[in-house]
């Protein structure tokens, strides 16, 4: 079925984008750009705020940002170009012999489609006490992953976002002489005349890169991150650069020919159920319209794009401010373009803190926003009393039964009941260590203390019941809300993206 571009509501989309940009402009802080396009032309552009608080230069469609995880579909395309060297059904261990245990058995396809259960590096390091600001390099991180071996869950049984698969496959390709940045320059940047670049370190100079900002109690602060970037999120470019690449995908031409269909093709769990996450691209829906896109977040940068493959039109939003909610804003613009209304936010589930009967799993509901193991999504009104997320990488389908929250998160069955606190805190006071990674923490009263010298942090603890605690911590611009599950003299620390770290009581 073909759709005429004249059916689209360009002026309504432009008005919606302008309201978003005007809010940035009026604040006179960091800002962003929103570009609305079809397969051939940029139809509308709205910009607001500043690309630099130091120089006062306004943000424009040519301001260069860190795309973060928008990188993923482009890296997946680069990997698939070399299927003579690496295939989707290959075991990771066949290309990276240092990997061990169940991690080595994850296939390349599952590592890319978020069903592999691979612990996310950044979240795992944060559980060991490494700040987002701590500098790390590629090989030590790979050595660290080699030592882990375990998965968050058996591969293929659920979907949960992780950057690790992209890092590992990039390392495998690098061992074969294929460098991501060189592939991007040869295959995309030069043919399209755009300025995509893929630096490996946050501190590598990138021409025209604007700083990212996050708001602390002291005001706007420069964003920075020490983790080696990897092809999970290293790409940089402008809103215009991103739109030009997406036009090539929509138009099925040049460097984009054939890739939209391949990257967005259905992927499946081991039980045969389809997911809505492909290879670096995620499906969502507004009314009867199926859209595909992806977001990206680095410290101080928030971005998102959505495209309609049938109407061959889309929106790209980039920003250099941490408080941007890019997926929701992109959905607003696309809804206006399509003449559709977004579903209503769901508040059917009572606000409060809930926990599974056992295990590390907890859920907090607050004004229609659901936070599961520290990762959050907005819930919308679904059919037959269900509350659903519009996220492919963190799908939620939940309902209140009168005594429990039941449904699915990440396609895995979940059930939560209101938290019933116990006296766990009084029984776990003292010193806990993870000898394998030279990490430790102290529980004193209702606080968890971790780190050394002036970098030592302190975070409040509260009971989840069932010998479990919830820690409400901070890591630079981000919250770090992890659960602690105690079994005798051992304790596991859990975030949604990392469920493999164990400590034991110090002798």
Image: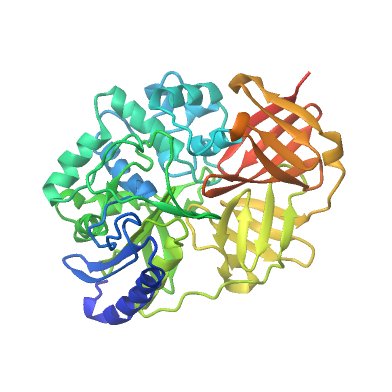
Q: Residue at x 51, y 49 (%)?
A: 477
Question: Eyeballing the image, is 500 above or below 43?
Answer: above
Q: What is the count of numbered marks? A: 0
Q: Residue at x 54, y 45 (%)?
A: 271
The image quadrant where one finds the C terminus is top right
Question: Eyeballing the image, is 138 above or below 352?
Answer: above
As rendered, which of 172 and 479 lies closer to the eye? 479
Could you say where residue 502 lies in the image, as x and y percent from the top left?
Answer: 67, 29
Q: Inspect this view and state whether residue 128 appears.
A: no
Q: Quadrant of residue 198?
A: top left
Could you say where residue 47 lies in the image, as x and y percent from the top left?
Answer: 30, 68
Q: Residue at x 15, y 39 (%)?
A: 186
Could you say where residue 136 lies in the image, as x and y percent from the top left?
Answer: 44, 29
Q: Inspect this view and state whether residue 169 appears.
A: yes
Left or right: 130 as drawn, with respect to 35: right
Q: State the colouring used for the structure image.
A: rainbow
């Amino acid at each position: 079925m073909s759709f005429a571009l004249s059916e689209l509501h360009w002026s309504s989309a432009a008005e919606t984008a302008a309201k978003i940009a005007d809010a940035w402009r009026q604040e006179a802080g960091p800002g962003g750009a929103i570009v609305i396009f079809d397969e051939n032309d940029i139809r509308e552009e709205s910009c607001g705020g500043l690309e630099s608080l130091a120089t006062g230069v306004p943000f424009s469609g040519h301001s260069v940002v860190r795309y973060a995880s928008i990188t993923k579909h482009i890296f997946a395309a680069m990997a698939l170009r070399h299927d003579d060297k690496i295939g989707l059904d290959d075991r990771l261990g066949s290309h990276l012999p240092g990997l061990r245990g169940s991690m080595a058995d994850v296939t390349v396809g599952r590592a890319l489609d978020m069903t592999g259960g691979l612990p996310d590096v950044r979240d795992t390091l944060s559980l060991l006490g490494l700040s987002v600001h701590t500098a790390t390099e590629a090989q030590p991180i790979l050595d660290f992953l080699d030592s882990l071996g375990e998965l968050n869950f058996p591969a293929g049984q659920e979907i949960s976002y992780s950057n690790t698969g992209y890092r590992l496959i990039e390392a495998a390709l690098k061992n074969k002489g294929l460098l991501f940045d060189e592939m991007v320059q040869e295959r995309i940047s030069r043919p399209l005349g755009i300025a995509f670049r893929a630096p490996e370190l946050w501190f590598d100079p990138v021409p025209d890169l604007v700083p990212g900002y996050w708001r602390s109690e002291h005001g706007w602060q420069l964003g920075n991150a020490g983790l080696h970037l990897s092809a999970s999120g290293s790409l940089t470019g402008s809103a215009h650069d991103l739109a030009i690449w997406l036009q090539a995908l929509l138009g099925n031409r040049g460097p984009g020919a054939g890739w939209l269909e391949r990257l967005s093709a259905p992927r499946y769990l081991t039980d045969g159920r389809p997911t809505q996450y492909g290879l670096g691209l995620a499906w969502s829906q507004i009314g009867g319209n199926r859209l595909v896109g992806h977001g990206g977040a680095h410290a101080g940068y928030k971005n998102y794009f959505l495209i309609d493959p049938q109407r061959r039109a889309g929106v790209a939003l980039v920003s250099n401010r941490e408080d941007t909610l890019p997926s929701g804003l992109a959905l607003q613009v696309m809804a206006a373009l399509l003449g559709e209304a977004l579903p209503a936010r769901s508040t059917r589930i009572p606000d409060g803190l809930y926990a599974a009967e056992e295990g590390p799993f907890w859920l907090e509901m607050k004004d229609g926003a659901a936070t599961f193991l520290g990762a959050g999504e907005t819930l919308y009104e679904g059919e037959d009393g269900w509350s659903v997320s519009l996220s492919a990488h963190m799908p939620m389908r939940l309902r209140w039964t009168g005594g429990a929250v039941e449904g699915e998160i990440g396609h895995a069955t979940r059930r939560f009941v209101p938290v019933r606190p116990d006296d766990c805190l009084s029984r776990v006071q003292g010193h806990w260590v993870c000898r394998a990674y030279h990490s430790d923490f102290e529980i004193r009263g209702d606080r968890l203390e971790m780190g050394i010298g002036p970098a030592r942090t302190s975070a409040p603890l509260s009971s989840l019941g069932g010998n479990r605690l919830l820690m409400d911590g901070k890591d630079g611009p981000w919250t770090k809300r992890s659960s602690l599950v105690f079994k005798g003299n051992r304790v596991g620390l859990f975030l949604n993206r990392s469920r493999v770290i164990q400590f034991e009581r110090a002798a």
